[in-house]
Image (spheres, coloured by chain):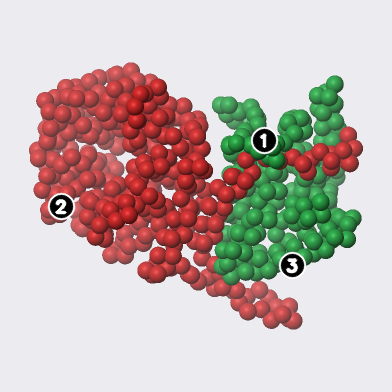
Amino acid sequence: MTEDRVRELLPDQRAPDEAAAQERAWRVVGAAFADREPARRAARPRRLVVAVTAVLALLVAGLTPPGQAVADWLRDAVRPGREHAREALVWLPARGRLLVTSQRGPWIVERDGSKRLLGAFEDAAWSPRGLFVVVTRGHEVIALEPGGRPRWSLARPGRVRAARWSPDGFRIAYQAGDALRIVAGDGTGDRPLATAVAAAPSAWWPGPAHRLAYADTRGRVSMIDGDSGRLLWRSAPAGVVTQLAWSSDGGRLLVVGPRALRQFDASGRLNDVLDMPAGTRAETAAFRPVTHEFALVSHMAAGDRSRLEVVEMSGGNVRRQSLLAGAGRFGGVAWAPDGEWLLAGWEAADQWVFIRTGNGERPTIERLRAVGNISRQFDPGGRGTPQFPGLGEWCCAPVGRPK
Amino acid sequence: MTALLALSAPARPGSEKIACIDGERANRDSGQNELQWIRAAQSGSSEAAEALFRRHWRPAYRAAYLVVRDAHAAEDIVQEAFLAALRALDRFDRRRPFGPWLHRIVVNRAIDWSRARALRREVGGSPAPDRAGPVSVDDRYSEDVASALAALPPEQRAVVVLRYVLGYTPGEIAKLLDAPRGTVNSRLRRGLDRLADELGEQER
């Protein structure tokens, strides 16, 4: 083949969907550029060849309120509308498997996007290494293999929910009615631990001992020894608690309530509080693996808007970085085990948004992928309007100290 | 046609001369524009960054697509390349052209991706053409040529794309890929022979 013939053929080659791909990419690239911290170049004498001088990096869009407002506005420009979403979930961008809770029951989503419905259960959680899933249904708590085969089940009076496996796999805590109970990982030794517990699932401390944090109906957070039931510490009451989450090194316990987030250390000392502005409700949060940062979803009643941000609280200092803002409600959030990809549900758009964040001081959007039509994908063949599914864990995040 | 050339093949000092006075002028003008955009983008101008992006996106995306034959992957690769390039913009030497800097990132990532994909043999890994949305008449591409190109090993694909889509000389390709010039020439020759075979079979 002659070069002329190739020159004739190849330059006319076009890639699929060029215009839309370009717009999708600019949303991410433009937002990342707007969010960068440009360096100030030292004035360079034009006529002199001089050695390279040091470049002083300056924060342009810092965390001052005006800077934050500008950053927020820019993040809004990133929102992936329906027209830019992929139509089907054909992969997960990072390794691991994802638990998803739909109206038909929990699903396991594999890396290649394939999905398996575990059955008509209400909620689900991974065992620490993803070898089993614990699910609940009515009065039952059931341990399943990921293929769906039950290993054991246990029935208790009262509605059973919020089962969570201990980090070493030897215990499962769950709630039956308003009681917190514990059972061994093989289904034996079931016993009560506490009563008058709040609906928020308890959270195992990710350390070697079987320590468990839970919230009670008075808004107090308690840490108990799961084996002896001994109370290790208890916080003062502070309103409704909707979620408890430990950082992967066990150094921080995040207590999420609609009006405020409280952060304790493992000994029960309250170190940080983040109050939500009036009219804004904290919805859900998730610690990024092997860091002290967490993703936070909040909803503003005025204008019915949601925001996703990455927050780090330390010694009274709060660092917040908005990633996305959009109309309506977002759903849950889940970090990939690698800690680089963050998945956020966006209920109002019926989308999942995968965001790869940087590892720098200020997390930024490095890549963004939206997948649409999520509700129907977790209700295949269903009649009527499907519900937007909830996000469970993306198995399995490492346990360890922040890098 | 000259305007198209100027848009799809950004000006590069030392690149092959386009045998057209208007084309040279267009390239020179666009090179000056580009220098201004880089300067402004280094100072934080989003408009300038967008101008750079829009000038270089399409050729880079086409090149990546022709190497990896997967639209999602190509989009990711080029997006990441732009992110990397814009992140490093403050360190960029304005005396150098932006295009080769970007294309070096794009093509090397595309080669890495193609090699990794060949090893992984992912589910659905056959390099089927992928249309992420409605394709207009203008967006159609020649299936024959793209398929023939896909039959080449990634390294040959890359040099063919760099040479005949992005318009680099063999010497420039050698620099971009950190490969000896002789290697580039032999990859080009083998690539052309293989393309001829592939297209010849389809024409029969």
Identify the amino acid type marked 2: Gly
Residue A15 in picture, x, y percent from top left = 68, 40
The chain holding disc 3 is B
Looking at the rendered structure, whether the residues under marks 1 and 3 are on a common chain is answered as yes
Residue on which disc 2 sits: A239
User: With B49 as the anchor, is A368 left or right in this view?
Assistant: left
Point out the residue furthest to the front here.
B137
Residue on which disc 3 sits: B32
Residue on which disc 1 sits: B69
Give the alpha-carbon distance from disc 2 to disc 1, as whole Å: 55 Å
Residue A326 in picture, x, y percent from top left = 40, 51
Give the alpha-carbon distance from disc 3 to disc 2, as whole Å: 62 Å
Q: What is chain B's hue in the picture? A: green
Chain in red?
A: A
Residue A201 in picture, x, y percent from top left = 22, 39
Q: Is residue A71 above or below residue B5?
A: below
